[in-house]
Image (cartoon, grey):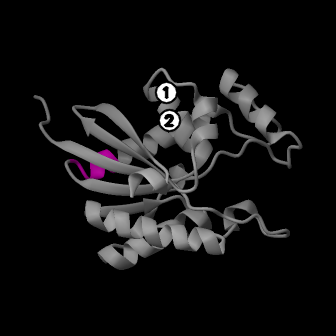
Amino acid sequence: MANNTTTTIWLIRHAKAGQPTGIREPDWPLTDEGQIQAQRLGTFLETQAPDHLYASPFLRARQTLAPAANLTGHTIKILEDLRERRLAGTLIEDFVSAMRESFADDTQRLAGGETLAECRTRVRRAIDHICLAHSGQSIAACSHGAAIASLISDLDDVDGFAMWQSLKNPHVIKLTIHDGVIGWHDLGSEETYA
């Protein structure tokens, strides 16, 4: 029997974060500009009236949704599978070229890293989890650029590398899920979604 409900997920790339020396990447905080962006995003999300908020465990994702949590009164639930992709175990000098190659071959694994296919699988698992738990509702979920691009490139005939490069901080993509089919609409950065 068909499910007549539509679930909406506001899939968000986090606001602008810093990369302070000596701080592990999962603990990179939002910059002052990113904090302002998060406030504006919170106002936008308040108008969309999400029923639930989910974030990657990374600090920048949680900080991005903090204003929305304050405005809506919802608690931010942490979902490990929304985390950013770990491309390699060490710093890569030419990160952009490495990302391009990984989108061209989604089974490529650098030492200490996660393949793009593995990233895509766990992000899809996160989306499926949210849909199962909150069918017919509206959810805001904050993740990261490579994780989001890996998902979108799997949903549609989209160049994942070009998608990754186009994602701003913050960036909003509206997913609509009906009868197990995921549709998506790129609302873009705050200049276009607000």
Please name the amino acid that badge 2 sits on: Leu
SS category of the residue bearing label 1: helix
Q: In this view, does 22 lie to the left or right of 16?
A: right
Span colored in magenta: 130-135
Question: What number of labels is visible?
Answer: 2
Residue annotated with mark 1: 154
Task: Give the image quarter of residue 57.
Answer: bottom right
Task: Give the image quarter of residue 160.
Answer: top right
User: Percent position (x, y) of residue 125?
Assistant: 44, 41
Q: Is residue 172 left or right of residue 168?
A: left
User: Percent position (x, y) of residue 185?
Assistant: 37, 38
Residue annotated with mark 2: 151
Q: In this view, does 136 lie to the left or right of 186?
A: left
Crowding around mark 2 (Cα neighbors within 10 Å: few <14, some 14 to 19, many 20+) is: many
SS category of the residue bearing label 2: helix
Residue at far front of view: 191
Q: Do the residues labelled 1 and 2 touch (CB within 8 Å)?
A: yes
Task: Give the image quarter of residue 4.
Answer: top left
* Residue at the spot 61% in from the left edge and 31% down from the top edge: 162
